[in-house]
Amino acid sequence: MSNQHNDFFYKKMPLIEHLKELRARLMACIFSIIVFSVVSFIFWHRTNNLLLPGNVSLIYISPQEALMAKMKLSFFCGLLLSLPVIFFEFWKFIVPALTIDERKFYLFLGMLSFLLFFCGVFFGIFIITPALIKFFLKFSQPSLMPLFSIANYSSLVINIAAASGLAFQMPVIMMLAAAGGLLDRESMARYRGHAVILIFIVAAVITPPDAFSQIALALPMWGLYELGLVLTIFIKKKRQET
């Protein structure tokens, strides 16, 4: 076993102690989500201005729908605001089992993933969602008024934001694949053209049939793929050194 490991393994902490520590850290994460969700619920008017559209009318068609949508969006905001706490607690739990080099690598990877996720959420809420709404509003007519249910709209915003956040993890996935030996950088670079075509096909499928929306999604994804190729250079150098 590498001498870079700290005395975590030498102490041979019983399984029950690991479970107790895990429970304590999970409780801290849950508490953080609850607190931030409550804060988001209290300051709902500000959340509403950020996440909900100002150019369309929202309605609710059941007595509890508005309250449930408000709670759902508040929980989503609470989860987003709690991500730094969740990341910190997860990191503190796993760091004793990592070598010095592994700590540096996974800390960088975690911070990159964290940053990219928030960029993806921002992109989904403020770029993709308005483009979708603009497209759907084209179907309105004098006899067909666009009145969106707040429950359906809030679900749309949350789904798009979460999907964009996950899609922006492409460079992280590429780095993990390279570090684990599943893919090498040469293969990813060799099939760059295929990847770009696939990206544009996916963008065409999941966006409205207009060039702006498709390009608005495809270009950032292409950029993320190129970023992943750049970052895998360091993985390749590290593997060669070892």
Image (cartoon, rainbow, N blue to C red):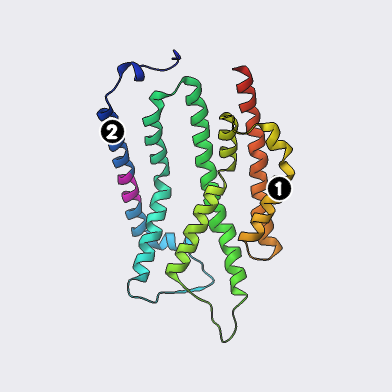
State the SS at label 1: helix
Residue denoted by label 1: 196
At label 1, the amino acid type is: Val
Taking depth in this image into account, of 2 and 28 the one nearest to the observer is 2
Nearest to N terminus: mark 1 or mark 2? 2
Label at residue 38: none
**163 left or right of 186?**
left
Q: Which residues are magenta?
A: 30-36
Position of 139 relative to 68 (above/below)? below
Position of 17 relative to 128 (above/below)? above
**30 left or right of 99?**
left
The answer to whether mark 1 and mark 2 are in CB contact below 8 A is: no
State the SS at label 2: helix
Dominant SS of magenta comes to helix
Q: Residue at x 31, y 50 (%)?
A: 34
**84 left or right of 117?**
left
- Counting the numbered discs, the total is 2
Task: Please tell me whether residue 164 belongs to the stretch shown in magenta.
Answer: no
Label at residue 19: 2
